Image: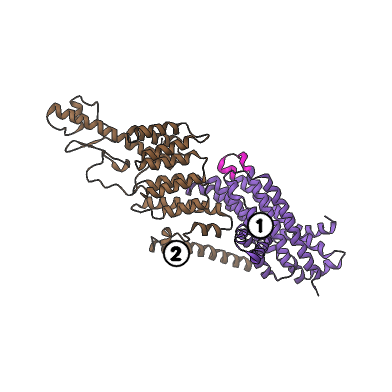
Chain colours: A brown, B purple
Amino acid sequence: MIRSRQVTAIAGTMLVCSIVSAALLTRAVDHLRPTAPLQEMLYITSPKLLKRLCLGYDGLLADIYWTRTVQYFGGTHSRGGGTYKLLWPLLNITTQLDPQLVPAYEFGETFLVAKPPQGAGDPQKAIELARSGIQNNPDNWRMYYDLAFVYYDQKDYRGAAEAFLRGSQLPHSHPFLRIMAAQMAQHGGELNTARMMWSATLQTGPDPLIRANAAAHLRAIQVDEDVTVLEQFIQKYRDKTGHLPAAFSDMVSAGLIKGIPLDPIGHPYSLEPGGRVVVSVPEDLPFLDKGVPSGYVPHAAPKLFPAG
Amino acid sequence: MNSRVFHIATNTFREAVRDRVLYNLIGFAVLMSAAAVLVGQISIQIERLVVINLGLTAVSLFGIVIAIFIGIGLVSKEIDKRTLYTVLSRPVRRWEFIAGKFFGLSGTLVVNTFFMAIGVFAALAYVSHNLLRSDIGVLVALYFIVLQFIIITALALLFSSFSTPIFSAIFAFWLFVIGSFAQDLRNFAAMTHGVTRWLATGAAYLVPNFSALNVITQVAHGEPVPHSLILFNTIYTLVYSIAVLSAAVLIFERRNLK
């Protein structure tokens, strides 16, 4: 009996020690090979073959591929400098395995169309995905909304207006689609239209990441407007004094503005020589058209603060 | 069901439980708990989908593995252990032995599926905080999975009645794979001409139509399953299982057990 207990104790100890050692060794091997090629492999490239191979359990496989897509995008995004070359094939496989997987279309289009380093910068694939989403989910107005957004991003305001209009004709579609169709047809390239589009996404977006992306775009639009207005005040200051202000405090002293202006995050704007208004922490404000400091190279992985 | 068939069925159920078949429920519980907790953290917007897809796929695959690996041994094990002679020396007909084994294993799988279904709904309630009306579709998918088990049990029993366990497992597994392509097989057959068409069509209709019994993806998206499909699948399973069991009885009746 005592002998049996001794064997149990020794075997148990050896089991635990061996498992812990194996785990530690695996970690050591991972450190030796930090970028194993696993992430960049697709294994099976044909969605049709994959659908056949999974013996009818395609729903679960689509979920696995969707999770892989999310992990691939997140991993490439956080490492920075990635090209997202697998984003489209992964999305294509996911949506062909499960054509009703709406989040894959919505997320996919947003990040396929976004320019690097925020996304893959492949609007044609985004349009292809959006059209496939409409074909497979013809009663879902969000599919038309997303297609319109891709067209809008490509400054194809006519295509966007048409997609909004088609979406608005569906039963149970959101009322703002009809408004957006009219707005897009008349004032496609205006900042107010952009604000309406992103505000609608912020309010109705189904996912925190998509809403955070919309919030970042709204902040960028706000900076665009702030910079335009502030540069008008700088011109006024120049007209009044004959020279450019050295800092915003000069303009405050001149009574042109009430205080040091702040960007949507709460950081003070900066003034560059030559009278250019720029944001002081550009890393916090991706998607800017105006207000980018001279010589600033966008960070590979821009911050997306939670919306709201 | 006559009392002899019932006794054999009860003993088959007890034997399966004694063989620790229901231990798979522990693995299933761990899988569902992990899915419910982890998926929300590593994916986007598919918590419910994963619980339904993973849960129903696991119920299906666990059950199929059990049906094949227990089913193939139902007859051969009794012959190897010579317990079959004891049973057949009593007033038990050979067809009653086959029927009892079939009902016993089917009952085991139904009980197993019942506990797994509780796990699926518990995980679903955890991730969604409530159950939806459309979740009734999950029950329909579970019912179809049970129908799959019934057909596979019958097939495993058929192969077990004349072949060795290893070959029975191979035959049953391949018929499951081929049956999952039943729809494609019929489409291929429709493309052929003449005698080939007759033969191909015949073969396509002979394999079990498992593709019609898989509605997992459909119910995961809350799409309703037509009542007519439930009725037709039920009748199909009944008819197909009777056909397979009849073949098993025919073979077993003529088998020389000496």
Query: Which residue sits furthest top?
Result: A255
Mark 1: few, some, or many residues within 10 Å (few <14, many ≥20)?
many
State the image coordinates of residue A288 (x, y, percent, origin top left).
30, 40
Give the farthest residue toward the bottom. B258
Q: Is residue B149 left or right of residue B258?
A: left
| A19 versus A194 height, above or below | below
Residue with the mark numbered 1 = B209
Q: Which mark is residue A25?
A: 2
The residue under label 1 is which amino acid type? Asn
- Name above or below for residue B136 compared with residue A26: above
Q: What element carries label 2?
A: helix
Q: Can you give x and y, in whole percent of width and height, for residue B201 in the image?
A: 66, 61
Tell me the subunit letter for badge 1. Answer: B
Residue found 76% across the figure and 57% down from its top: B103
- Both marks 1 and 2 on one chain: no
Whole-angstrom CA distance, mark 1 to mark 2, is: 48 Å
- Is A236 above or below relative to B156? above
Q: Give the chain letter at badge 2.
A: A
Q: Which of B86 and A226 is in front in this view?
A: A226
Q: Give the range drawn in magenta.
A: B124-135
Q: Can residue A305 be seen in this view?
A: no
Q: Nearer the viewer, residue B197 or B119?
A: B197
